[in-house]
Amino acid sequence: MASGQGWYVFGVTGSDVTVPAGLDATPLAAAVEGLAAASIQAIVSRVAVDDLVGELPQDPTWLVPRVEAHDRVLIDIAALLPVVPFRFGVVHSSEERLVASLADRADRLKAALAQVGGCQEWTVVVEAGDGAAPSEAPPAAGPGRSYLLARHAALSARERVERAVAGIRQSCDAWEVPTALLPASPDDAERLACLVRRDRADDVRTQLESVAAGDVHVTVRGPLPPYHFVGHDMR
């Protein structure tokens, strides 16, 4: 039996803007469009509902490219328009159900859109550079002393990174840039999300990259969808 058509939702934006053409949602969907409802506009794709339920979403080879497509669409939109991003996997079985869901949450969605309107999220990555590598123990040192020296150097590097993160957050407070501390990356770098006004993005990015010096490296990545500044229940 053929799958029924549903409406996949990437997020919402203002009803007065045009969703960019040519957004690449493959293999998640063939095309992306806007659907106006309740004074907001959902960013949607028409999909086969059966493709997003059952066992397929549990298979990483199926899931990962579609999650990447979801993020790719939102990243491209966030570079141009205010957007409230939804998490991967929001699909409605009909246009009527989608419109009803948006209408029920219209006030919250419009408030979230107003909060991030005119802003972009950037991720600041702070990590110890090569100069923070542990010092080698003297040749005569035993394994116990080698471990203690390495442990001391690692703790010192961690302290330097933590001080740099604290300095960045303090600077962001002075610039009136909201921040959110993120989980450390797999390589143990500290990460911080910053909500930056579009018209200040280049200036703030330059300042953020210059906050830390010495053997602490700061990298700023973005712009990204403002996942960390619209609440945790946008599904």
Image (cartoon, rainbow, N blue to C red):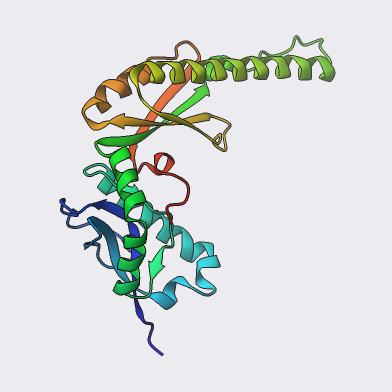
Q: Measured from the top left, where is residue 23 in percent x and y?
A: 24, 56
Q: Position of residue 142 (x, y in %)?
A: 84, 16
Which x, y percent locates residue 37? 24, 62
Q: Quadrant of residue 111?
A: top left
Up-down relation of residue 50 to residue 104 (above or below): below
> Where is 93 relative to 58, above or below?
below
Quadrant in the picture for the N terminus: bottom left
Residue shown at 55%/36% (left/top)?
183
Q: Which residue is more in the foreground, 154 or 38?
A: 38
Observer-nearest of 153 and 70? 70
Kindly tell me whether residue 18 is visible in this rendering.
Answer: yes
Rendered residue at 74%/14% (across/down):
149
For residue 207, side relative to residue 181 (left or right): left
Q: Quadrant of residue 154?
A: top right
Left or right: residue 14 versus residue 116 is: left
Q: Residue at x 44, y 44 (%)?
A: 231
In the displayed structure, does residue 202 sit left or right of residue 228? left
Is residue 27 visible in the rendered image? The answer is no
Q: Nearer the viewer, residue 219 or 176?
A: 176
Q: Quadrant of the C terminus?
A: bottom left
Of 225 and 106, which appears nearest the observer? 106
